[in-house]
Image: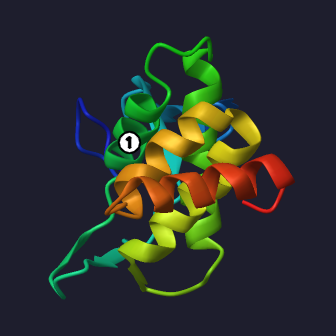
Amino acid sequence: MRCPKCQHTNSKVVDSRHADEMNAIRRRRECEDCATRFTTFERIELSPLVVIKKDGTREVFDRSKVLDGLLKACEKRTIPYDEIEKRADNVEAALRNLNKAEISSNDIGESVMKELITLDQVAYVRFASVYREFKDIDQLMDILQNLEKGKA
């Protein structure tokens, strides 16, 4: 690590603390040459997930898209934002736990639905109606009946 003042490469760690909700380590360092103190952060670098979309195109996974979908499904419901964010984190963790570099958009949709069914039934039906692209009222009624029976 180079000192920001003198560019010397040797420094010692004076203090270490967890940062960013335990996802990073904050280190206070002191340059061994000029005694300047500075801060560095260590973070885990996750490999990017590539999403294979329905049309066969590929793009890098974007957690904000999952969060947007959850927010739309939960719109006008009494669900705290923190809970929705937690569910987006759960979806990303589930996808990373598949240990695949490429995942299908179907994997994402199914993971979101698993989170929504335990969060809010109305939000689940909203998301499912868009995700499953219902063609008529009968398909919607099927999912509502399965939800009522606990089979969704």
Residue 27 vs residue 21: left or right? Answer: left
Give the residue at x 64% y 49%. 144
Residue 108 x, y percent position in the rendering:
47, 66
Q: Residues within 10 Å of mark 1 (few under 14, many from 20)?
A: some
Which quadrant of the figure has residue 12?
top right
Residue 148 x, y percent position in the rendering:
79, 47
Which of the colour schemes (rainbow, by chain, secondary structure, one colour) is used? rainbow
Which quadrant of the figure has residue 86?
top right
Residue 30 vs residue 82: left or right? Answer: left
Give the residue at x 57% y 71%. 96
Residue 66 vs residue 18: left or right? Answer: left
Question: Disc 1 residue type?
Answer: Gly
**Residue 31, placed above or below residue 102:** above
Residue 15 vs residue 92: left or right? Answer: right
In this view of the protein, which residue sits in the foreground, 55 or 61? 55
Which quadrant of the figure has residue 104?
bottom left
Residue 10 visible? The answer is no
The residue pinned by badge 1 equals: 69
Residue 111 x, y percent position in the rendering:
58, 62
Q: Mark 1 falls on what kind of element? A: helix
Residue 4 visible? The answer is yes
